[in-house]
Image: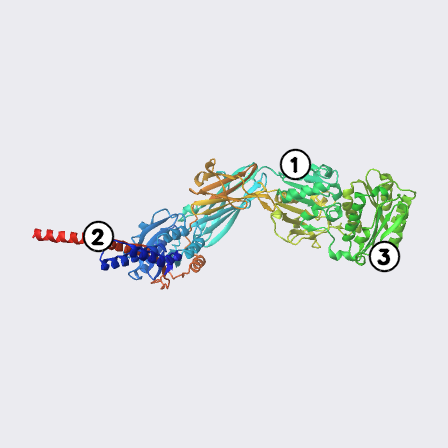
Amino acid sequence: MDWSHPRILLLIFPALALLAWVHWRSTHPMPPQRRTALLGVRAAIVALVLLALAGPAMERRSTEETVIFVLDHSASEGARGVQAGMDAANRLAAALPAETRTGFVSTAEHPAVLRLPTTERTPLSPPLELARDGGAETDLAAGVALARGLFPPGAASRVVLLTDGYETRGDLEAAAREAALSGVRLDAVPIAGELRPDVRAVALTASKARLHEGATVELSAVVESSLAGEGRARLFENGIEVESRRLTVDTGQTQTLVFRRTPEQRNLYNYRVRLEGFAGDSVPANNEALALVDVRGRPLLLYVEGEEGEAHYLTEAMAREGVRLQARPPQALPEALTELNGYDGVILSDVAAHRLSERAMVLLRDYVEKLGGGLVMIGGMNSFGVGGYYRTPIEELLPVKIRAPDEEERQSVALAMVIDRSGSMSGEKIELCKSAATATIELLGKQDYVTVVAFDSAARVVVPMAKRGETPGFASQIATIDAGGGTNIYPCMTSARDALAGVKAKVKHMIVLTDGQSEGSGYEGLAAQLKAEGITVSTVGVGSDADIQLLQAMAAAGGGQCYSNVDPQAVTRIFTQDAMKHMGRLVREEQFAPRMVERHAMLKGWDAAQGPPLLGYVKTTRKATAQVPLVTDLNDPLLAHWRFGLGKVTAFTSDCKSRWASLWITGWPGYSQFWSQVLRETARDSQSGDMDLRIESNGDRARVIVEVMEDAAHFRNDATVEADVSFLPAGSLGSALKPMAQQRLEQEASGRYAGDFELREPGLYLVRARSGAQTVSGGFVRNASGEAATGRVNTALLARVCELAGGQLLSADAAKLPVSRASRAQVVDLAPVLLGMMLVLFLADIALRRWENVMGFIETVREWRKGAR
């Protein structure tokens, strides 16, 4: 016994006490016996009313069972399979106890009720009764769902599924889970369909659902056969036949045909493969398969080349491949994200980091991460580590580490940094120089030597010459540099020279930085003498007041580089670039042949083994989650790729021009194909970068799901997202799309918007969703028929669904169903019974209060009977 409102029961005793008090205070003339009886009746009425208000209920368990048989009458079963399923259902139903109710449901493209649950045992009529539709599809989930809604309350529920287990629509496993949650047991009887000669187009799959003009799409048609013979496979593009192949099939064979198409104009392309001419094919409805490809305009990439006069090699090659490149020098890189967003990708080729502003680097990172743009970094003598990208926003984007591999640290280097600390360097300049010195030392190996010398009118050794691993406090020592005094470089260079001369290192290099005019003379001679002693000298002139002519002469005499009119913000990148370049570790200029070690779409149809060798590359190491399809002969990364935020980044550590790729450029067609595929795969997808669309089917309905992003880490909520659905019937693929539905998608989770539309018939469904200025599109294909006359049973699926719903997979010739121990609990509401009893007592109450009237009525009836005699 259970009560909905048990606290009401507490009112019984106070109510009875109140009733007794009112009764004893009453002055109504009545005999004592009737008075006592009336009190008892009224007390019972009050008690019954309060008991009914408390909501009493009682649970009653029943072992009575209802069994509903779901029969598959799809084309894959054939006439014999349908008859076998019906015979098995009749046999199993006849073996059930007489009190068990049985019902019958058929399912194929649509489910139908053959008989509602009843104790009648009349066998089902012949297979014609099952022919409710053409059987061109199999939706087992819909049949189970229909059966689940037919069970009467209070009885144990059981579904018996008689099928080959091959579904072409719906989700039987999901239906089994829902049945289990409803307390419905599901058993299955495997009924193999009739094995008939059949050639079937299982699917036509496009390698990409969206692409740019001029890109090649691969269409893979999977063909199954249960007959041997010859025929043709015809491919149609927008209703026009574009290719026909002779096809030979064999019994039990599955083969894949690959068609390649290169759409030259932006459009929605629908493709259909049709199998024809196979003698004896018994199921012609499954001889077609469809695919949908959305082709957008040709990709446009911004090409930033660091070496003047070298951009034409890649630009001309990509023009032949249908990829548009807009070449600009580094200083013309857009400084606004809106302008950068007009490109599908950006190429940085051999561009030194100091030639890009900090703002430009941050914009490139945001362009990739938040707007879904593509970035390709190509090597050269001023790229990756030797380009000074250490500790920059670009370094975060790259799929490779730009520091030297560990095994290279055995080559010892000695580096001296000579830094101007005169009065004109006060403020931001000196702080940036200190940061540059610290970052440069961090790039060195533990066995490398380093010293930092600062100068004004005199030299001051800030970090004495020592091995990098033996100077753990170098950062705090560098932090003590302050500005003040004049400018005299000579004593400082002499001090650094003495420090370098005192160590044994394979490479010795000096970097001199100043922002003004130096006192004294003889600098060119000193630089030449340093070079003769094996010490190279590079110079950095900060600002327009530096003696650029002197610094250029020193660098030329010392065998290094001169960086003039440098923005103080670029000092760190220049220091790290120059140190990396002169340490001689990160560039390898030797001939090598690329090796492919991972499969990737960038390398599809491209054979590196057939091409000439490359002549050099910048050394890097891969990051943990990056893909590295191509490596060098020493297994260093050559081509690396990964996703960063919403976009993609590719690194190619050799170059694309005449220094290292000269043999690729001169007449090898693989050069154009390689770079075309690399750029297309890296470029922004041909849709909005902050919207994603997918379509899921469920029976005769499809669900559109759109996810809208603010940026890589945040969803956009409360957005207005609308979807337009267009339809192209399978039989008229050459005609125009027909508008079918337009609806506003409802938000169902953070950044997620969804809506449903009806799948009316086989064909192509195109969905375009929009939110503000952003759009995204997607397609869904519903093939004419997925049925196949294979004569097989999908035992694995049937076993899984039986396990999910607590049933068993029986044999096809089972004589009876296994005994089910399940019982069904039924809750009986006792309130109506109590209220009925109360009504009877209420009539008794009236009779007691009007006893004289009752007795008079009885006397009248008696006298009427006497007179009637």
How would you rate the neighbour count of disc 1 (Cα within 10 Å): few for under 14, some for 14-19, many for 20 or more? few
Q: Quadrant of the N terminus?
A: bottom left
Q: Position of residue 420 (x, y in %)?
A: 85, 45
Q: Earlier in the sequence, mark 2 or mark 3?
A: 3
Residue 35 picture location, percent across and down: 25, 57
Q: Which mark is residue 783?
A: none
Q: Which sits earlier in the primary sequence, circle 2 or circle 1? A: 1
- Specify few, some or many for label 2: CA neighbours under 10 Å numbering under 14, 14-19, or 20 or more: few
Q: Foreground mark, 3 or 1?
A: 1
Query: Does the image show residue 423?
Result: yes
Q: CA distance from mark 2 to mark 1?
A: 99 Å
Residue 231 placement (x, y as % from top left): 46, 46
Secondary structure found at label 1: helix
Q: Residue furthest top?
A: 736
Q: Which mark is on residue 850? A: 2
- Residue 154 seen by the camera: no
Instruction: Quickly name the residue at label 1.
Output: 339
Marks 3 and 1 in Cβ contact (< 8 Å) = no
Q: Residue at x 89, y 53 (%)?
A: 498
Q: Which residue position holds label 3? A: 504
What is the secondary structure assignment of the residue under circle 2? loop
> Label 3's element?
loop
Q: Which amino acid type corresponds to the residue marked 2 in the rendered image? A: Arg
Q: State the residue in front, 500 or 265.
A: 500
What's the amino acid at mark 1?
Answer: Glu
Identify which residue, 71 or 590, lies in the foreground: 71
Asked whether disc 2 touches disc 1, contact meaning CB atoms under 8 Å apart, the reply is no
Q: Which residue is at a point 58% across and 37% down the rendered structure image? A: 297
Mark 2, mark 3: which one is toward the viewer?
2
Answer with the quarter of the image where residue 377 lies.
top right
Q: CA distance from mark 2 to mark 3?
A: 129 Å
